[in-house]
Structures are given as C-alpha cells and as structure tokens.
Image (tube, coloured by chain):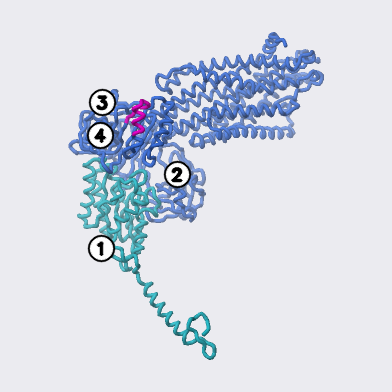
Chain colours: A blue, B cyan
Amino acid sequence: MMIHPGFIRREIIRSSKQAMVFILCVGLSLVTLTAFSGFSKSIYQSLLHDARKLHAADIIIQSYETLSNPLSQAISEKVQEGSAELARYHEFYSVIRTNDDSTSVLSLLKVVEKGYPFYGNVVLKSGRPLHEVLTSGQTVVAPTLLDRLGLKIGDAIQVGYTSLTIQDVVLTEPDRPVSIFSFGPRVFIAAEDLDTLGLVQTGSRIRQVHLLKVNDSEQIDALAYGLRQVADLEREQVDTFQTTRSRIKRFHERFIFFLNLVGIFILVVSGVGIQSTLTALLNEKQYAIAIMKALGATNRYILVHYMMIVMLLGSIGMGAGILTGVFIQFGLVNLLSALLPPNTPFLIAWSGLAESVVLGILVVLIFSFLPLYRLRGMRPVMILRKDIPVLTRHWPVLASYGVFALFFFGLVFRHMQDIRFGLYFVAGVCGLILITMAITYGMLRALKGLHIRNLAIRQAVKGLFRKGGATQTIMVSLTTSLCVIFSIYLVEQNLDATFVKSFPQDSPNLFFLDIQPAQTAAFSKAMNQDVPFYPIVRARVTHVNNDAIDRQSERNKKRDNLARVFNLTYRHHLLDDEVIINGAGLFRSDWQEIQVSVLDTVIDMHPMDIGDTIQFNIQGVPLTARISSIRSRTKGSLRPFFYFVFEKDTLKSAPQTMFAAFRVSQEDIGPLQTRVVNQFPNINVIDLTETIRVFAGIIKKLSEIIRGFSVLSIFAGVLILISAVFATRAERITESVYYKILGARKAFVVKVFSLENLLIGLASSVLAVILSQAGTYVICRFVLEIDFRMFLTSCALMVAAAVILVNGVGIFSARSILEKKPITYLREQPDA
Amino acid sequence: MHSSGFLFARKDSAGRCLQERSYLIRIMVFLFVLLSIFACSNESPSAKSRPELQGNGDMGFGTIVAVGDSLTAGYGVDETEAYPALLEKRLLLDGFFFKVINAGISGETSSGTLSRIEWVIRSLNPDIIILETGANDGLRGVDPKVLEKNLDGIITTIQANGIGILLAGMKMPPNLGPVHTARFSKIYPRMANKHNIPLIPFFLESVAGDARYNLSDRMHPNPEGYRRILDTIYPYVLEVIKRRP
C-alpha cells in the first residue's frame, strides 16, 4: 500500500487548530510525567532528607537499658564489616547547678559520641562544628541555661559529680523538634565524660540511643529488619528514619501519595483531551473520508493514513512535552534548591524519561482507539443521508474502556505499590465518572423536558441535543477535569489554613503550667501584661447517659478515648479558633441543670448529642452535666483547647490549677523564664519557638509544591475545554448559517452560543464543586489527616471563573464560526 | 414408721407425726441459733493469719482519701487496679469497712496538692488521708525547699482538721544528680518527725526501676506493681487506723 505524505500534510494543515490542541494534550501528559518523574524523586529525596535530619541517622535504636548481647553484637558486626557507622548518645534529665550551688536548673542532657549527628547540623553560636568545641571537660549549652543560672561562656557548671566549662551556645539541633516537649534547656556533653558524671546508676532513667549511618542506602530496611530479629522488642526499639513514629514523616508520605494522585489525574485528563480533540478532528473529515471511500479507498488505507497523522502529531507532542518537562526541571532550580539536599545534581533521569515516552505512546494509542475505530463507520452513503457515523457494535467501546481501566490501574499500582489501594482508587475514579455521567444524563433529560418561552434560551437548550453533539461527553470531561482542579485548589487552601494559619505571628510560643489560683495576680504583674488564664480541673468521664464507660474497650481504641483524665475548664466565651457547630450558644439560659459544652473531638470518641448527660468524677466527687452545645476548632493550632467547658459557677470552687500561653519575643524568653522560676518555682515553662519554626517552614514548602501542580492541572482543564468546543464545531457552523439565513443577526447567534456554553459551564462547574468537596474531604481527613473546610466563597468564585472561562474559550474558538457567511458555507457544502 | 420427710416420724393413732417432729424442730432451732452465733462473728479463718489488728466494727469503718499524683491516680492502668481500689478490697477482707477514695491527679505537684487539700477535706470528709506527693516536684527539678514548705502546709492543714495522716516517702532517680536526690529524699523523714506521723519510707519500694512492675515508661507501676505497693503500704495503713482516737 502506498503512503501519501502530501495527503497527511494537507489533512494536518486543514485542521491545524485541532492538531495543535492534540499536540498540546499529548505534550501536557508528558510534561506532567517528566516533571513529576524527575521532581518526585527530587522532592522525595528532599522530604527524606528532612526526615533523615529530623532523626540524625538512618537507623535509630533506643532503649532505657544496656542493649541486649545479640543486638549489641549484631550492631558491632555491621560496623566492623563496614556496612554502617555507629554513634551513640545518652539522653536524660539532670539538675545542673552553679558551682557555688546558689541556683540550679533542670536540664536535658545529651552525652554524644563524635559521629553525632550523621545528618543535619548542630548549629553553635560561634559557627564552629560541634565536635571541635565539645571535648572532655567542656560543655555546650542552650541560651536559656545561661539566663537561668546567670552564667556566661567560660563559666563552670556542676553536672553530677563533675564540673564542666561552658564553651559555646547551641542555637539549633537537627533532631530536637521530633520530640516536642522538654522541661529543660539542652546541655551537650562529650561521651568521654559520661563515667565521670556518675549519673548512670541502677535506677537512673536514661535513654540510650545507637545511631547508624548505613553506607548503602538501599540496605537500610534490610539491615534494620535484621537488627529487629535479634532485638528484645519489649525493651529495645529499632526504627529507620522512615519508620519512626514521626508526625512529619507520616505527613510526608501522605503528601507524596497525594502528588502521585495529582500526576495520574493530569495524565488521564490529558488523555481525555486527546480523545476529544481527535474526535473533533475526524468529525471534520467525515465527508472527505466518505468521498475517498466512494472513490475506492479501503478502510485500511484510511486507517493507516490517519494512524500516521496521529503518530506524527503524537510524536511532536511527545517531543514538545519532554523538552518542556526538562526545561521546567532546570528552570525551577531556584525553587527546588530550597527544597533539596545540598549538592544534589540536576540530571535528566533517563530511565524516567524512557518511561515517560512509553507511557506517552500508550496514552496516545489508548485514547485514539475509539475515534480511529469510528472511521470504519464513515461510509459513502453518508454524503446522501448526511448521517453521523455511529458505532453499531458495543465491543469496541467496552474494549476501549476495559483497556483504559487496566492502564489506569497499572499506573496507580506502579506509583502506589499497593494493589488494594489501587483497586479502591480505580473504583473511586470509575465511580466518579459514573456518578457524573448519571447526573449529567439526568440534568439533560430534565432540560429537554422543559418548556422554555425565550427563543434564545430555547435554541441554546436545543443546541445541547444537536445531532452528533457530545454534550454529555463534554460535560463529563469538563466536570471531571474541573473536579480535579477544584480539589487540588481546595486541598491547598485547607493545607494553608490548617498549618500556615495555625502558626500566625501572634500564636503563643511559651506555655506555663501549674500556676496556682492564688498566684495569678502576682504572675500577671511579673509578666507586665494582662495574662489570659485557663483554669484546669482534672476529672474523668464515668458515664454517658447513665451508661458506664467501659474503660478497657476505650483504652483498646488506637486513638484518643474517654478512659483518660481530662482537663475541664470554665468560661463563658469562645476562644479565637473555636466555633459552635451545634447549639445556639455555649450554654442555655432556659436550663436549670449543670451544663457542659463539648468539643467535636469528644463526639468522635463516643456518640453524644445536645441534651445528653455526662457524668464526671472530679477527684472522687461525682458531677453530672447536660450537653448544651458542641464546638469545633482549628486543628493543628497551637492555641490551648479544652474538650469540656463548664459555666463558671459550676467549677470555680473545684480544685484547679491555671494554665497560660502567650507570645514572647525570642530575646526575652531566657530572662522571662529566669524571672518565673525565681518567683514561682512551682510553675513550669515550655518553650515551643523552635518547634513552631520547623513545622511551619516544612508545611510552607509543601504548599508551594502543590501550587505548582495546580497550575499544570488548570492548563489541562483549559485544553479539555478547547477540545470540547472543537468537537462540535461543524454542527455549530451549520446552525449559525441557518440562523442568519432565517434573519437572525450575529448578536443573536452569539447569544445562543453563549447561553449554551453558559449552561454547559454552569452545570459542569457546579457538579464539579460538589464532587470536589467530597473528594477534598476524603483527602484532608483520611489521607493528609488535617482539618476540612468548605471554602464556599472560593468555590463560588471558582464556579464563576470556570463559567467565564468556558464561555470565553467557547466564543473565542467559535469566532470563525460566527464570521462564516451563509453563502460561503453553502458553496462549501458537497451537495450544494 | 413412714416416711414423711422426717427420719424419726411416728404416727399416732390418728396418723399424725407429733413427738418426733417436735424433737426435730428443737434440734433445728438449736442448730439455727448456733449458726447465727457463728454468722455474727467477724472472725474468718483467713483473718487468723493477718496482722494482729482486726477490725471489729468499732474502729473498722470510715473514709480514707488517697491524695496524690499519677502514682495514686493509677496512670496507665484501670482505676480498679490502682492502689486505692486494691486497698479498699484488702481492708474489707480483713474486716475494715473503709471506703477508699482515689483523689489522685496525674502530673500534680505539691503546690497543687496544697491548693486543693482544703477542698478534699471539705468535700470528701475523710477520716484518714494517705498523702503521696512530691514526685513531680522532684522530676521537674523544683527546689526541694518548695516541696518541704508545701508538705509542711499540707500536713498542718490535715492535722488541724483532726484527720489521720499517712505520709508516703519518695526518692528520685540518680540521674537527676546527687545533690538534688539527697536533699529530696531527706524531706519526708524530716516532715514525719516534725509532725509525728507515720511514714512509708519509700512508696515505690521494690517497684521503682524494675521493668517487671512498671509500664513501658519505666516510671508508673503496672497492675503487678500496684499489688506490691499495696503489700508495702498496708501495715502502715493499719497503723494509722490503730492510731485513730
């Protein structure tokens, strides 16, 4: 069979707009794949690097006793054979005293060997490396210790049975934020001084940590597994930096998981765009193909030539996509350099690139199958009947969907490595599409049955059902892609709200515990400000609606439960980050009995509702209260919160302590702590400044990554929209001509097309918002485990923007249609 | 002879079982009285092996309030497995009808105990208070003078209300430093001497630091640990009961 390059060239040139959109769709699918393939490894390495820094090693072995012989031997063997490097440290509390014994402070000691930390740095005020400063007889301390003891660098402190000289001040350490609370400033001591301290004795409570840096990072899990096999797991804990119970680490995993979902979705959306565009392109060719067949062209001839058009356009798209992906990878160096470990080379991942090419080919083939298969139905008789080619057999459609589902599932499994989740995800997406199809079908049926008086609106509605039109397909494509875009935006907004806004400039960084009621006035005076005090009354929950709490089954729940001790409080106002979600106010004026307002978290522990009763045991004294309201708060916020809030009169006489939290500037923290300890030795001060800084910084980084992917997904949506308009171009031209022949002006035609686009855009975007709210809820609550908000105002704006965009793109794409003169059109018709 | 349910039944000429029934009834009444005497006795076989002090109803009832921190509250275990609940059961077995109320608060320091001791006395009306506090002061590095002053205030308040008191001594782990641990551990004997009150030398005797008797945090007793604590404190509780006027 002869190939006619001229035919191929002419076909592409004549449908240049659709061809361009096709190329862009193919390119976009590969841009995402290439960028994500390169970025995901970089981002993953960056996040892993953060995780490594947070744990200072690859493998972390902890125990409160000397390691068992088998574990100790196993570690020694690995070190001796060169598989890993070892550094140990002992961490424990001790009371540090000045040499004249005039003052003392509880401190958190870390007695470290030379290798510590393997990742991250201990930053000293002098800028010198830790082990250059930390030699025998010397110590490095946190600034607050100097403030508390009234000392300076060069002075000596008494630690255990020995005296050490302060050589430097520690500003940050890599693995401190993992354990948030500590009751004292940090003191670093060299391992050589451990014995002379004399504090490691029977009965001492000392955490012994063995850190391993594994030379081959691929062997970390295997090595950790081997160590676990010989460890006494009741008293020895073996973790890798990936398995330690770190909230940050868990969040990173879920974040990568979410990005994988985004990448797959964009790929699929691009594929839908490929199908729509190709359908539009081939629809324009249907008469030409019918004529060619009438002149003797075989199906094979037609198919081969159009396949070559598809492969040619696909190749151009793949090339453009790969180049753009690489360009983006290099072009965003500045953004990524803040995220990546130092000295990370920016190399093209050739294997990732090859994978992208293969996937690009698969996407083109899979999504081109149906449009190309329809070529068989384009018969010469169409010229006389003006028929639309339809698929008379269902097996191609079913086969196409089957292949698509397999491909999709394969993609999900490839990225998620979890068959069960892959099935859930594919089922979820198929469910999304089926729900969308069902709802759009219902909407269109309802519209079809409406009796509309206004001519323009009536014609717009009729336009939705034009012969050969694919309104439902367009709406499903639009809804699906808009749903993805809206979901990404809503997730980013929820991330932003939960973490970034949970750390506002004025969020408290110092927490004061155990303030006695009689000390509040003096404490406020000492702080030189009005201090908001939170009264705390400790109590247990014993009954709900007269049913006793089963403490054992409560404790078996792997989450917060009613078996523990709670901090009750009393007040008559809501805190800044609280809202009432059920109930007219905190308390009801028409109730005489004791009332309590509960946080929604309590409802998660045990079903309760307004009017139910809860019985408490306040240090032996029972108290029954009726639920008057249910509150909710910004989760992740560091502001104090209480599960149970009573009226003042109920608890003001109960035994209580006070709790205070407010913001103090960094330079005032040390002197303030000293003042508090001297005047109120019973009050504990907890400093969360560093923790807040680390957490907020990491989450800000992650939000920026999501924002980047949002831009890509919006671009995918726009392409879908354009391809959808092109899909019905031919029919719109015909209608436009007929309107003009019947006397309508251009303005009327514009109005009809605009209304049609408005209907499609409005229906698709409203449905997309509803579905994206559900999807975002699932992602926020169960994947990222953050609070969920609906952001209804933003949703309304997104709907408006989508409608404007759909209409704008639709009218812009149709301007050549609107300019078409009737006589020109009629002359172009084959049966004119 | 016929069988009418009685072994010795004889019919009279009218077929009635008279004399032997009356005899049996007398035997049954005698047995009933004998059993009643035994039932009213508080003495049980197991009581013979208990310490010499036996509850006999005259001094063997009242309210004991266990005031303290998480070691009293029973952090990490069910309240029924913490020492106050075990103490109540043991006392009941020995014939002492004392209600033992758990007024422990996890995390509390002696300052908190001082703040609420009057409320405890007013609300719970105890006859005896077992005072176990100060561990959190020590673990947080609070100056031992603060603990001593608070303990002094608490004990004075309790004694001013005519309530019996048993003081639980505490020690600190060696890692906190020799000066701190020594000063801390001397407080309790000093207070016991000053106020002439019984002292449990070390509340966590044979429990502290032993992984078998503690939760995974190595600081709070597990159920077995609390049973050992009960064995430690029980004789002292009995002593306080005996001291009551």
Relative vertical location of residue A163 with respect to residue A820 in this rendering, above or below: below
Q: State which quadrant residue A154 falls in.
A: top left
Mark 2: amino acid: Asp
| Residue at 37% from the left image edge and 72% from the top image edge | B40
- The answer to whether one can see residue A810 in this image is no
Residue A5 locus on image (x, y percent): 68, 9
Residue identified by numbered label 4: A194
- Which region shows up in magenta? A73-87
- Nearest the viewer among A669 and A112 is A112
Tag 3 secondary structure: helix
- The answer to whether one can see residue B6 in this image is yes
Q: What is the number of the mark on residue A340?
A: none
Disc 1/disc 3 C-alpha distance (Å): 62 Å
Question: Local crowd at mark 4 within 10 Å, few (<14), some, or many (≥20)?
Answer: some
Mark 1: amino acid: Arg
- Label 2 vs 4, first from the N-terminus: 4
Residue identified by numbered label 1: B243
* Residue A227 left/right relative to A707: left
- Label 3 vs 2, first from the N-terminus: 3
Q: Chain of mark 1?
A: B
* Residue A322 left/right relative to B109: right
* Residue A207 left/right relative to B19: left
The answer to the question of whether label 4 and label 3 lie on touching residues, with beta carbons closer than 8 A, is no
